[in-house]
Amino acid sequence: MSEFELIRDGEQTWDVVVVGGGTAGLSGALNLARVRRSVLVIDKGEPRNAPAAGAHGVLGREGISPLELLRLGREEVASYGGRVASGQVARISRDGAGFRVVIEGGQRVRARRVLVTTGLVDVLPDVPGLAERWGRDVLHCVYCHGWEVRDKAIGVLGNFHQALLFRQMSKDVTLFLHTGMELADEQWEQLAALGVGVVDGEITGLEVGGQDQLAGVRLASGRVVPVQQLVVAPRFLARARFLGELGVTMQEHPMGLGEQLRVDASGFTGVQGVWAAGNVSDVLAGVPAAAAAGTTAAAAIHMDLLKADAEAAALAAKGGGVFSAAMEAEVSRRMQGSRAHGLDSFLSGN
Ligand SMILES: Cc1cc2nc3c(=O)[nH]c(=O)nc-3n(C[C@H](O)[C@H](O)[C@H](O)COP(=O)(O)OP(=O)(O)OC[C@H]3O[C@@H](n4cnc5c(N)ncnc54)[C@H](O)[C@@H]3O)c2cc1C
């Protein structure tokens, strides 16, 4: 019997199904489990920073292996009764007052609330051989890798701000204009003053040394410029297609860095019962910010469930009946009307 058949067997409706078990999802699940919510995390198991040797800037766990951090997180969730299952969610649809969560392969679970923490896809520049080196010597984030590459020969692919960020870490920085990048006069002046070299011409490939280390950047002219690290600026695309049926809103990042789910400060998506946290709704969130967002969303979901439970209990007490699914549907309808999330500005589009 598979993991999901086991879960389905009890015909349980989970208080919360968390889709994605990275830092954001596991942090949310930990906090929900600790307030005695039944919580199921469904995780495909491919966190964004998996290629990196260490997760940096993580207070108290500085440099820990990303996969070890999540292994510990899973253990912590389980220690409070939360369940973590491997799988990929294909679709989520409404099911009365709650949701039906469909996993690839056709299995289903039911949830009263959903927390989406599926992260993002880094769309890398289309240069042969570049994707294979991602997270090792092809990098994007100075806070994640800057210290580790300090004083090395660093190339930057087509991004002025990345050149400034990495110039703080090394005096040996070269900006490759590649295709389509143009610099303003003051940017040329600033780069020259900082000693950042600028190389024109399309990059057609990477040179790799004997010990599988980046050795240089090859240009269309055939020239090879030696670099030990190459910094790129991916486009960040939230993994949210599977939410299509629910009516969530995707929006362009304010700095034009990619697309993310639109949420308010609590992670609420504007769709009743659906929250999101981490990179799926904030493409710039590092590990600590993703964890914090998962925690914040967990608190908001818990409060939403508390209100629903209290209203249903009062209704049941008045009617002398029991707290039924129909009652929760009624409570849910009333809550949607009164907008219990403090989301008025979000819903009015401000
Ligand atoms: C190379 C690299 C190095 C980095 N280094 C650092 C660093 O040193 N410090 C730092 O603070 N940040 C670092 N980051 C950023 C860090 O990766 C993110 O902050 C963090 O992963 C965000 O956590 P998350 O939970 O939102 O998403 P993720 O960690 O990406 O987790 C999302 C999870 O959801 C799963 N999933 C996706 N779709 C589905 C689905 N349909 N059903 C079920 N599961 C699904 C994924 O497989 C994954 O397990 C780095 C990023 C990269 C790319």
Image (cartoon, rainbow, N blue to C red):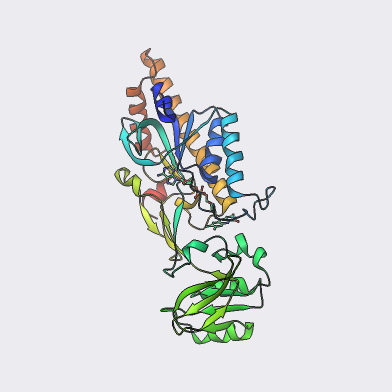
Q: Where is residue 208, by image quadrant?
A: bottom right
Q: Position of residue 41 (x, y in %)?
A: 48, 36
Q: Residue at x 53, y 30 (%)?
A: 82
Which residue is nearer to you in this view: 281 or 334? Answer: 281
Q: Position of residue 273 (x, y in %)?
A: 39, 37
In this image, 239 relative to 144: left or right?
left
Asked whether residue 308 appears in the rendered view, the answer is: no
**Relative height, residue 332 to residue 56 (above, below):** above
Q: Position of residue 302 (x, y in %)?
A: 50, 33
**Relative height, residue 190 to residue 112 (above, below):** below
Q: Residue at x 52, y 76 (%)?
A: 217
Q: Residue at x 43, y 26 (%)?
A: 7
**Relative height, residue 262 to residue 334 (above, below):** below
Which residue is nearer to you in this view: 149 or 120? Answer: 149
Q: Position of residue 80 (x, y in %)?
A: 58, 29
Which residue is nearer to you in this view: 281 or 143? Answer: 143
Q: Where is residue 213, by image quadrant?
A: bottom right
> In the rendered image, which quarter contains the N terminus?
top left
Asked whether residue 184 appears in the rendered view, the answer is: yes
Which residue is nearer to you in this view: 131 or 314? Answer: 131
In this image, 169 relative to 322: left or right?
right
Q: Where is residue 143, by image quadrant?
A: bottom right
